[in-house]
Every structure is written in structure tokens, then in C-alpha cells.
Amino acid sequence: MPAYKRVLLKLSGEALMGDDAFGINPITIDSMVKEIADVVNSGVQLAIVIGGGNIFRGVAGGAAGMDRATADYMGMLATMMNSLALQDALRQKGVEARVQSALRMDQVVEPYIRPRAIRALSEGKVVIFAAGTGNPFFTTDTAAALRGAEMGVEIVLKATKVDGIYSADPMKDPTATLYKTMTFDEAIIKNLQVMDATAFALCRDRKLPIKVFSILKPGALMRVVQGESEGTLVHV
Ligand code: UDP
């Protein structure tokens, strides 16, 4: 039995990359979509925000001398590619999915319209929010917090490559332990980079819990939506 009625899943662009150095790996996206399909078929309403880091990040363009806002718009376009790839992969698995974009691209996807997104979710369709917040200088983590709050989700699921928040970097320190739960204040005091500061502040203000878990662990997404012990829960 799912523990939640409506959730928002934040996938980083890198999650689509698999072991490749760049872009979208078909095997990786296929296995991810299977996990997403299981969750949707269990009756959970699912909104998704996807990043673009596997293709382009504004900060990299900025560092290379580009105008930062222009580079950020390119980053947002990267999230559009990932969103379309995810929508297509979901549809091929029989999961109804639609993309709504924060930047207009009318020939390709519908624009972000909050009531339409809510209605689609209520009908059991997956809604993928493309182009982040639509504003440069923000991230898709912030888009996840924002759209999550707007959609009235019960929790933001932050999918990462690590299976939660550790007391130290588990790659470097073998004594590092996994936190099962943590308050927003603890995460701030410990200066943990759960999400970027803007996203984190928005979730804390809205009392919107965040679950950090590994998307690479088979079945983890399903266990998370069933409220089982998995990853780290950040709460008020
Ligand atoms: N971006 C932006 N505004 C937003 C969301 C994203 O400008 O509201 C740009 C920004 O340049 C960012 C890129 O899109 O680097 C890709 O998003 P992000 O880095 O969050 O992707 P992820 O790290 O999750 O793959």
C-alpha cells in the first residue's frame, strides 16, 4: 500500500547518463522507467522534475566565459530534451505522461498551467515539468520544491546516486553512517548539501519533507513511496 497519494520526484540529469560521460543512456532510462511505472501502477500520483546536468549546466557555460543568463537558458533547454526522452520512454511502457514547460515551446509541449497539471495528476497521468522554474540563476532542485509545493504533494523525493545522507562522505570515510531522519535545522547546522539553499528554504517554509534516496538501487523508489525504511527523511 502506498504511503503517499501524490509525490514529486526530482531526477538529476546525471541519473539518465548511466555509465556514459554525457547524454541519455537508453538502458538506464529504460530501467528507471520500469521503476516509475511500478509506482504509478500502484496508484501514486507522480510529478517529475528532471535536471539537465547530463547535457549542459549554466554554471559551466558561465565559467567558460558565456553570459550566465544565456548559459542558464541553455541549461533549461537541456532539461527539455531530458523531459521529452522521459515522456517517450514512459509512453512506450504504457504510462500516460505529459510534459509541461516553464518556457514556451508550443509546437512541442504545453506550457506550465497549474490547474491542468493538477487535473492530469488527479487522473493518474505523470506530469513532467520541463525548463526548471523558467528563470536563470535557479536550479531544477528549486523547480522541484516550487512545483512540489504548487501541486500540493506530500513529499519531495530527491533521487541521487547515494542512498541517503551520511555523517561523512561514504566514498572517503568507511565509518560514515547513514541518517534515517534529520530535521531541516540539523541539515542546515551540519551544512549538508541536500538540495541547493533556495530549494531547501522553500521546502522548510512549506513544511514539505524531502526524502533523499538512491535511484540506482533496484526497488528503492517503490519502497520510498510505500513508506518503508529507505534513504534519509528530512523533515521539520
Ligand atoms: N536552470 C535554470 N533555471 C532553473 C532550472 C535550471 O537556469 O529554474 C539551468 C541551470 O543552468 C542548470 C541547468 O538548467 O545548471 C540544468 O539544471 P540542473 O543543474 O538543476 O540539473 P541537474 O543537476 O539536476 O542535472
Image: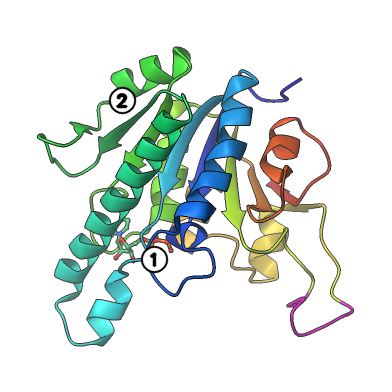
What is the x, y in percent for residue 150? 41, 31
The image quarter containing residue 87 is top left
Q: Nearer the viewer, residue 20 or 166?
A: 20
Quarter of the figure that contains the C terminus: top right
Position of residue 76 in the picture relative to residue 175 (left or right): left
Instruction: State the residue at coordinates (47%, 57%).
Output: 16
Which residues, given as a range, are shown in magenta?
Answer: 168-175
Q: Chief secondary structure of the magenta span?
A: loop
Residue 170 is covered by the magenta coloring: yes
Residue tagged 1: 53
Position of residue 97 in the picture relative to residue 17 (left or right): left
Secondary structure beneath disc 1? Answer: loop
- The residue type indicated by label 1 comes to Gly
Can you say whether 199 is above or below 152 in the image? below
Instruction: State the residue at coordinates (20%, 34%).
Output: 109
Instruction: State the residue at coordinates (75%, 37%).
Output: 223
Instruction: Confirm if mark 1 falls within 8 A of ligand 1.
Output: yes
- The residue type indicated by label 2 comes to Arg
Residue tagged 2: 114
Quadrant of the rendered image holding ligand 1: bottom left
